[in-house]
Image: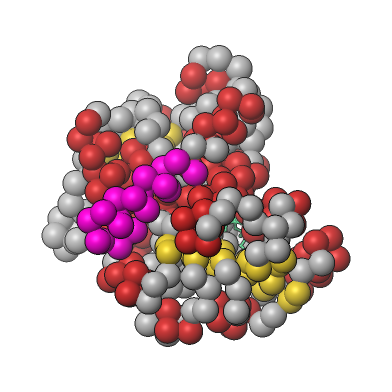
Amino acid sequence: PVFKAPDYAGHEQVVFASDPDAGLQAIIAIHDTTRGPALGGCRMWAYPTEQDAIADALRLSRGMTYKSALAELPLGGGKAVVLGDPGRDKSAALWRAFGRAIERLGGRYVTGEDVGTSVADLEVVRTATAHVAGIPEGGAGDPSPATAFGVFVGIQAAARRRLGGDSLAGLRVAVQGLGHVGLCLAEHLADAGAELVVADLAAERVETAVGRYGARAVAPARIHAEPVEVFAPCAMGAVLNDETIPELRAPVVAGSANNQLAEARHGAALAERGVLYAPDYAINAGGIINVSHESTRTGRPYDRQAAFARIARIHDTLERIFEIADAERIPTSTAADRLAEERLRAA
Ligand code: NAD
């Protein structure tokens, strides 16, 4: 049942959009528009069942509400999923039909790039609706460098709290995943004098990090257990779970991946182990902060300097979360939820 699904609670609207001629089956979940239009990317995935697609859309849209509220952006939370194999089922007709479905929502939902979708797809969506964020023309473009910068300042905040200083010189950081965000983060870390340990499923990305930044490569299955000061998950979700948490040797976990905790209780498991966890949606908000500075949102030309100055405030948000967690003796993940809910209520 959808209405009784745990992640349905709080949703304002869930739209099932279909266009058989265009091969479109999509779900657009609008969680909360209290702070502004529901902004969240569009994921395309060959979900095993419709139920999986609904569950993903609901969970992701709710996450966007919390992310934007915590970052104090004038945005709500939403997310779209398109059911299909991104390697096989994409067509211009499909993206135009998806754009029309968004257009019918009159701006309540604004889409963007996510797993399985690209800027090229969004350019086609844009022909049917203006409610698209993160595309190069008139926009801020690829959000990944902004996300990576936010994670970098977040690691500094966590290092200050747990390791006694903002400086990352000589600190060992294990980066899991060297994609759009991970590789850019590796560059910031190397520039700051950190020693890098890296892993990726793609050998050429590992070679790039080894060649450019003198990183040491390890097996993807073991990167979480490396003896380092910071473990930075920048690949897939649910990486902090019953198997990996007992094996962690890093006192800090701070990375870009969405939904890093396999279940909410793993936030407490990290705290019990003495690991300082930078909550994922707090530290990886750089991309959405950047998008919120696009001309379509502000009415002014995109100003990269202003956007990045705002992203740097992720440092302060994390400090606040760490303070609340300490003062109330709660996991940092719970502290982040409370702060986000407070900011949502204030709006
Ligand atoms: P990406 O697809 O460009 O990169 C992911 C990388 O992880 C790939 O190189 C892939 O080979 C690697 N990988 C996958 N499984 C792995 C494993 N088991 N071990 C090691 N490496 C593995 O994605 P991205 O845009 O860099 O995003 C990374 C993470 O950050 C995702 O969880 C994403 O949801 C999250 N995120 C990204 C942004 C953004 O702006 N791109 C914003 C917020 C959150």
Q: Residue furthest front?
A: 164
Residue at 51% across, 22% down: 296
**Residue 48 visible within the image:** no
316 in magenta: yes
Q: Quadrant of the N terminus?
A: bottom left
Does residue 100 appear to the left or right of 108 in the view shown?
A: right
Does residue 267 appear to the left or right of 127 in the view shown?
A: left
Magenta stretch bounds: 315-332
Residue 151 image offset from top left, x and y in percent: 56, 51
Does residue 287 appear to the left or right of 182 in the view shown?
A: left
User: Is 346 in front, or is 98?
Assistant: 346
Residue 56 image offset from top left, x and y in percent: 36, 60
User: Is 155 in front, or is 167?
Assistant: 167
Residue at 24% across, 29% down: 347
Principal secondary structure, stretch drawn in magenta: helix
User: Is 76 in front, or is 22?
Assistant: 76
Task: Say above or below: 214 vs 116.
Answer: below
Asked where in the image residue 193 lies, by quadrant, the reply is: bottom right
Asked where in the image residue 177 lies, by quadrant, the reply is: bottom right
User: Is 288 in front, or is 217?
Assistant: 217
Residue at 40% across, 31% down: 73
Residue at 25% across, 37% down: 344
Asked where in the image residue 271 lies, by quadrant, the reply is: bottom left
223 in magenta: no
